[in-house]
Structure formats: C-alpha cells, structure tokens
Amino acid sequence: FSRINRIAAPAVARSTRGFASSSARQTKVAVLGAGGGIGQPLSLLLKMEPLISSLSLYDIRGAPGVAADVSHVDTYSTVKGYPQDQLDAALDGANIVVIPAGVPRKPGMTRDDLFNTNASIVQGLAKACANVCPDAHMLIISNPVNSTVPIVASTYGPKFNPRRLFGVTTLDVVRSSRFLSEVTGDKPEDIKVTVVGGHSGVTIVPLLSQTPQAKSLQFGGAEWSKLVHRIQFGGDEVVQAKDGAGSATLSMAYAAAKFTNSLLRALNGEKGVIVPSFVRSPLFEAEGVDFFSSNIELGEEGVEKIHELGAISPEEQNLLDACIPDLIKNIKKGQDFASSA
Ligand code: NAD
Ligand code: LMR
C-alpha cells in the first residue's frame, strides 16, 4: 500500500495518528451526495470498511447530520460532514471519490430522462474534483451512467486519467447472481456473472454462457429470455415498487461498497482483482464506442488491464448488437453536453 501512503493528504495522516497501528492505511474516501437514499447507507457501509481511514461526507443537504450519526460507529475511520459551501474542503486529499448525487427515477421514466438534471450536477462536482483532487479515483453512480461517465472524462480534459474513472455497474452484477440463483437454486454468493456494455435497459448485457451455473439454461429459450430481461430491467422493479419514492438505494449502496472494496484491495497491492466496470475502453472503439463495461483487472494505479469479452453465444451476440447503438447515443450525448458547457 505504499502508493496509498504517498498520495494521502497530510491532514488525513494527522487525524488518524494515535489510533492507527503502524501498518494502517491512510485512504480518504469522499462521498458526494451522502445525504441521499444511496449516500446514507453507503456512508454506513464505508464506515465498516477497514481499508478506509477517513470518510468525507458531502451533500447540498444534510451531510453534517449523516456524518455525526455515522461517526459514532466504533470502527477505525474518522468521519467528517461538509455542507453545501464546503465542497473543496470535502475533497481535499481524497484518494477515492464516490458520486451518488442526483435525482432518481419515478415510474414511467427512463434513466435518460434524468439527464437534464443530473448532467449539470455531475459536471459541477467533476469540475471541483479536477481542481482539488485530480488524481483521485472517481466512482460514478449518478444516472444515466452511460452519459455521466463521459461527462466526467470530458470535464477533466487534459487531466483525464482513464485508469481512474469508473462507472459503477456492480448492481447489474449483483442482480445477475441473485436472479440466476432464484432460477437454478445455487447459492448467489457462488455465482459470478460477467455483465458487459452499459447501465440501462438493453445496454446491460449479461454473459450467462460464461457462468457455469447457467449451463442448464436453454439459450434463446423462454427461461433465458425472462432472466436476461429481468437483469436488464431490474431497476424498474424497484422503481415500480417504490411507487414514486425513488429507485434502488439499499442494494445500490451494497453494490457500491462492494466495488469500492475491490478497488481498495487492488490499490493496496492485492493482485487478481477482476470486476466489471464502465470505463474508457478500446474494446469497441472501432465501432465508435468510447466507454464500455467489461471485466477489468484493478491494480495499484486503478485500471490495470481491460479484458476481452471472450467466447459468447450467438444469442449474446444479438444482445450486444442491440446494445451498441444505444450506448453510442448515450455516450455522445454526454460528450456533447460537456463540450457545449
Ligand atoms: P436521492 O434523491 O435520494 O439522493 C440524491 C442526493 O444527491 C440528495 O441528498 C441530494 O441533496 C444530493 N445532491 C443533489 N445535487 C447535489 C450536488 N450538486 N452536490 C451534492 N449532492 C447533491 O437519490 P438516490 O436514490 O440516492 O439516487 C442518486 C442517483 O443514483 C440517481 O441519479 C440514481 O438514478 C442513481 N442510481 C444509480 C445506480 C447505479 O447502478 N449506478 C443505482 C441506483 C441509483
Ligand atoms: C438501478 O439499476 O436500479 C438504477 O440505475 C436506478 C434506476 O433508475 O433503475
């Protein structure tokens, strides 16, 4: 974890001195949107993460209260909350920034319908990050992820480091394990599904042919089609059930904490950490797709290696063919927004 120690802010090191053992890591994580439906449980889960020494909670509403509450949990990290006018202070020295700020869907809306509101929110936060903590790893949750990630990249301009920008698509992976387990009876924790493409509707492409527990499914058959549809539109199940009160928050917080833990382990030197994430990718560049989610190996600098898709079934190739045009549109919309701002 020498890299983490080198980039840690002196303020963080000071705040943990006295509690930390000599081998303790100094990793500051900022959550932007910490007062929200995702932000609150995510802050709690990150408080339970031993690889974090300092948690910085920012929101335009309510972050100091959330921070005071979470700070009483008897785990290693220190917690501080920042109100609306203290974004720069919240970001000072951050190694990882997680962004769940922005409005969620209501029934009848697509993720793209959130673009008008969330594009500006994410862009404003990205500008501050590019100024204050340009080397931080950026984990983007705010929807539409297919567009907000390109917005962050364009906002960074020459400072953009493709190894350190991640669209968090882990909820699709989490859902895939759970939903497949409901079909086969296998334990969800034993099921690993690679989900590629993007994060909305048909851009979500689960490669079930690569999952041993899915081998009994007839690809292209009714059961497979139903499962794929459920994975692609799992977000809608929650939006419908919450009936106007928002979208997935608790399962999303779990998924974001899981992804953050993978990144932290890799930054701390663990080898072989491979997870899907929506990143700047060469895989479909020739077809005009600048960002794509696939399995990536994480390392001490962030993205270490982008994996090829590997063998896929003809049915999955059809899913991919349907994914690409939507993805190109979503990415371009984000890039155009950023360049016109
Ligand atoms: P929410 O409304 O409960 O919380 C959003 C929070 O963002 C609020 O506390 C709000 O005050 C804050 N906020 C707004 N503008 C801000 C700004 N400029 N700076 C800092 N904070 C700001 O919404 P939620 O349910 O937590 O969802 C948040 C976002 O996450 C939505 O866009 C939603 O679509 C998305 N989401 C993504 C995934 C995924 O898989 N990537 C899953 C679920 C939800
Ligand atoms: C999800 O997949 O649950 C999120 O992207 C939220 C949504 O709008 O469905």
Image (cartoon, rainbow, N blue to C red):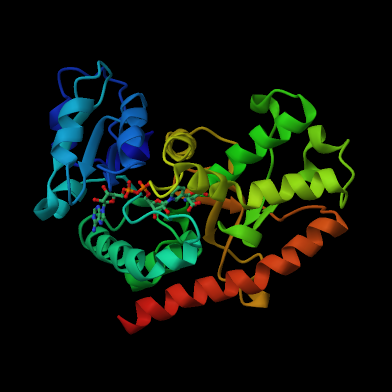
Q: Quadrant of residue 121?
A: bottom left
Q: Nearer the viewer, residue 308 or 109?
A: 109
Looking at the picture, does residue 185 appear above or below residue 183? above
Residue at 33%, 56% (x, y): give it. 102
Q: Residue furthest front?
A: 243
**Left or right of 177, for residue 158:** left
Q: Is residue 309 left or right of residue 86?
A: right
Residue 48, horizontal then vertical, whole percent: 35, 24
* Residue 69 visible in the picture: yes
Q: Position of residue 196 (x, y in %)?
A: 65, 54
- Taking the spot 36% from the left edge, 76% from the top edge, the residue there is 338
Compared with 254, 121 (above or below) is below
- Please say if 10 is above or below 154: above
Give the percent coordinates (x, y) of residue 233: 61, 52
User: Residue at 39% of width from left, 33% of height from top?
Assistant: 1
Q: Which quadrant, please, contains the C terminus?
A: bottom left
Q: Quick one: which residue is furthest to the bottom in this view?
A: 340
Relative depth, front residue between 293 and 230: 230
Q: Residue furthest left?
A: 85
Query: In the figure, is residue 50 to the left or right of 317?
Result: left
Number of marks drawn: 0
Query: Is residue 13 visible from the viewing direction of this image?
Result: no
**For the point 31% across and 45% down, which residue is it?**
95
Q: Is residue 31 left or right of residue 295?
A: left
Q: Position of residue 229 (x, y in %)?
A: 70, 51
Query: Where 217 falls versus 132 (above or below)?
Result: above
